[in-house]
Amino acid sequence: MRIRIALVVVAVSLAPLAVQPSPATTSIVREAVSFTVTNPLNPGHAYTIRGELVRPRAGCSGSVLLAMHGLSYASWAWDFPLQRDRYSVAQALAKRGYALLAVDRLGYATSEGKGRPDHPNGYTLTAEGYGEMAAQMVEQLRAGTYRAKKPVAFQHVGLIGHSAGTEDVELAAALHPGLVDVLIPTAYTHVPFVNNNWLIREWSQDNIRAGQSDYEYFETNPVIRAHDMYN
């Protein structure tokens, strides 16, 4: 039920993209896409952001949603590889005539720096930095200057974020008025939590790894995480 409600909300939010959804179809295309971006908090370095465009084979009327995942996830969160007919947001939208491009945020999964480790200076990977990189990707989607087998210039571009990814897309839209045609925030609140015990309960201590760097480090207990977040 929660998945169906979420899809209805997304579909309604997509109205400003002026897309005419095509009939549901299993003819879906998945294409590798990449962008070259810079981080204003770490000038002088170019980075590669990789992702996958999921769209109906018949086309998508020149409109696309750029999707940003949350902490501890990656682009696969939008096109979940297990039981896609049930769990994939990208596939569900493609069947309704919409295109979604999910990327790995810099430092996650396949996104990396050119000739540099795939985990850049963590102190520069702030919400503001991610927001600026998202804005650059939107501009490349409009201009058709991203890398793909057959890149096209999209007339309408929207941003959708999940959890921490919502913080990124909100900042991108706020810092660049008129940047996107639609903004869809999910799984995020501006109201402080009264009780954070659920988050503390999920953390697992890993003092060995934590002592190897001055970065804050934690990981989650998979059993407790699954119970708290997916039941």
Image (cartoon, helix red, strand yellow):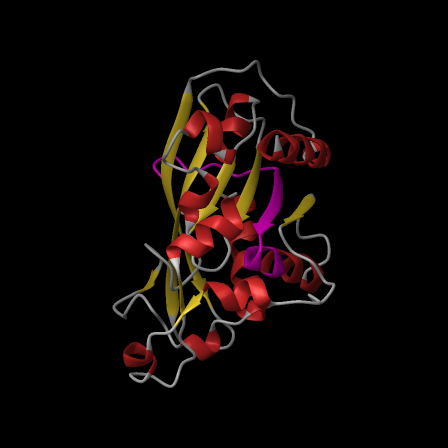
131 horizontally vs 56: left or right: right
Residue at x 52%, y 69% (from the top left corner): 200
- Along the line of sight, which residue is nearer the eye, 188 or 107? 188
Residue at 56%, 62% in the rendered image: 198
Residue plotted at (52% across, 27% down): 92
Is 144 rendered above or below residue 106?
Answer: above
Residue 69, how many percent across, how many down?
Answer: 50, 52
Direction from residue 231 to residue 169 in the image, left or right: right
Snapshot quadrant of residue 210: bottom left
Identify the magenta region: 147-167
Please identify the quadrant where the N terminus is shown: top right
Can you give x and y, in whole percent of width and height, for residue 29 in the image? Answer: 40, 27
Between residues 204 and 39, which one lies in front from this camera angle? 204
Asked whether residue 164 appears in the rendered view, the answer is yes
Asked if residue 43 shows in the view, the reply is: no
Estimate the x, y position of residue 166 in percent, counting from the top left: 61, 55
Image quadrant where residue 219 sits: bottom left
